[in-house]
Image: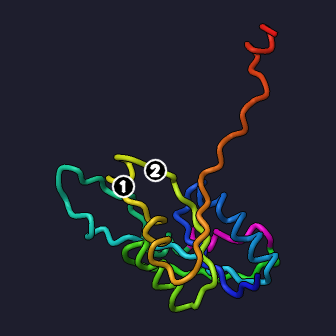
């Protein structure tokens, strides 16, 4: 598989950090470059009301600084950063189209049921509308212990 450009959206969460490892490995192994992107959501899009939860106040400069701290886990991988504003799913898909990306690698929180209905799923929207394949990385689960201390005593 030959990849030239991989889009890696980040929301700065630990989940994004886990997905960055996959994106870096794919970029390194295929010779692709990474386009690391964060989408700043327009606070006016939320409006006020009963369910309004204020978002943390991040200045654009602070977001740029934080974004530039997100770098591939292998320093040999070429990369660029983009800070965009708008609806995250829409902007990620639009960037992938404009950049003629070969792949998008992103984390997904794996929400289901009511939580997904209320929160929506950026990853799901990207998967449905992206012009290229999308690799979603679900939060890694801790490995189960062979035996808990209580089980070891009863054996």
Disc marking residue 52? none
Q: Main secondary structure of the magenta part?
A: loop
For disc 1, the marked residue is 119
67 within the magenta span: yes
23 within the magenta span: no
Between label 1 and label 2, give the one nearer the viewer: 2
Q: Which residue is at 59% across, 76% downward?
A: 133
| Residue 72 quadrant | bottom right
Image height of 131 relative to 126, above or below? below
Please state if 1 lies on the left or on the right of 36 as rendered: right
Residue 75: percent from left, percent from top: 80, 74
Residue 59: percent from left, percent from top: 42, 70
> 23 and 112: which one is in front?
112
- Magenta range: 65-74
Q: Which residue is at 46% across, 50% downward?
A: 111
SS category of the residue bearing label 2:
loop
> 104 and 24: which one is in front?
104
Disc marking residue 111? 2
Residue 21: percent from left, percent from top: 72, 63
Q: Quadrant of the N terminus?
A: bottom right
Q: Which residue is at 21% across, 64% downward?
A: 47
Q: Give the colour scheme of this rendering.
A: rainbow
Q: Quadrant of the C terminus?
A: top right
Density class for disc 1 (Cα within 10 Å; few <14, some 14-19, many ≥20) is few
Whether tag 1 and tag 2 are in contact, CB under 8 A, the answer is: yes
């Amino acid at each position: 598989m030959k990849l030239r450009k991989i889009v890696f959206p980040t929301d700065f969460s630990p989940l994004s950090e886990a997905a960055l490892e996959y994106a870096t490995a794919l970029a390194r192994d295929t010779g692709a470059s990474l386009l690391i992107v964060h989408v700043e959501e327009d606070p006016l899009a939320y409006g006020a009301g009963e369910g309004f939860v204020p978002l943390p106040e991040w200045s654009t400069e602070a977001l740029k600084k934080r974004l530039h701290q997100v770098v591939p886990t292998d320093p040999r991988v070429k990369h660029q950063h983009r800070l965009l504003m708008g609806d995250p799913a829409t902007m990620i898909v639009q960037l992938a189209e404009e950049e003629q990306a070969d792949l998008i690698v992103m984390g997904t929180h794996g929400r289901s049921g009511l939580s997904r209905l209320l929160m929506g799923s950026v990853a799901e929207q990207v998967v449905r509308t992206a012009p290229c394949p999308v690799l979603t990385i679900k939060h890694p689960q801790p490995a189960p212990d062979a035996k808990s201390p209580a089980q070891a005593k009863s054996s």
